[in-house]
């Protein structure tokens, strides 16, 4: 295994995940504020999951997203 190639592949995947997730969160929050489901002052509980097929790896990260 080439450690450098492996590390770069992981970073590329995580960057893609992060950018996509941020875009989806921003869109969902914007829509919720526009429709009145959120005021824009909430603290949202969030959970993200990662599964790697073939390895049996499942990881979950939980946290909070403050809108104000």
Image (tube, rainbow, N blue to C red):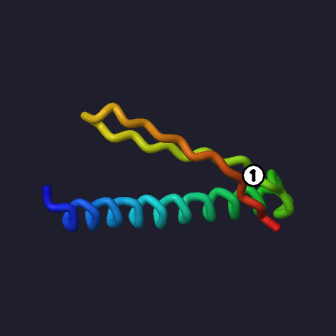
Residue extending furthest toward the top: 56
Q: Secondary structure at mark 1?
A: strand
Q: Residue furthest left?
A: 1
At horizontal 55% and vertical 59% (from top left) the residue drawn is: 24
In which quadrant of the rendered image does the C terminus lie?
bottom right
Q: Where is residue 1 shown, x and y percent of the image?
A: 13, 55
Residue drawn at (35%, 65%) of the image: 11
Q: Residue 38: give x, y in percent of width and height.
A: 81, 55
* Residue at position x 64%, y 57% in the image: 28
In the depicted view, which residue is nearer to us: 22 or 58? 58
Query: In the rendered image, which residue does mark 1 sit on?
Result: 44
Q: Residue at x 82, y 63 (%)?
A: 40
Left or right of 10 on screen, residue 27: right
Badge 1 density bin: few <14, some 14–19, many ≥20, Cα 10 Å: few
Q: State left or right for residue 42 relative to residue 44.
A: right
Please give left or right for residue 66 compared with residue 9 in the image.
right
Q: Is 29 drawn above or below residue 37 in the view shown?
A: below
Task: Answer left or right for 49 relative to 42.
Answer: left
Camera-side residue of 45 and 58: 58
Q: Which of the 4 quarters of the picture holds residue 31?
A: bottom right
Q: Position of residue 67 (x, y in %)?
A: 78, 64
């Amino acid at each position: 295994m080439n450690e450098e190639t492996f590390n770069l592949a992981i970073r590329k995947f995580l960057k893609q995940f992060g950018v996509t997730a941020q875009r989806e969160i921003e869109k969902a929050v914007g829509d919720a504020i526009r429709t009145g489901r959120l005021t824009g002052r909430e603290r949202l509980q969030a959970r993200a999951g990662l599964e790697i097929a073939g390895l049996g790896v499942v990881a979950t990260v939980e946290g909070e997203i403050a809108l104000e």
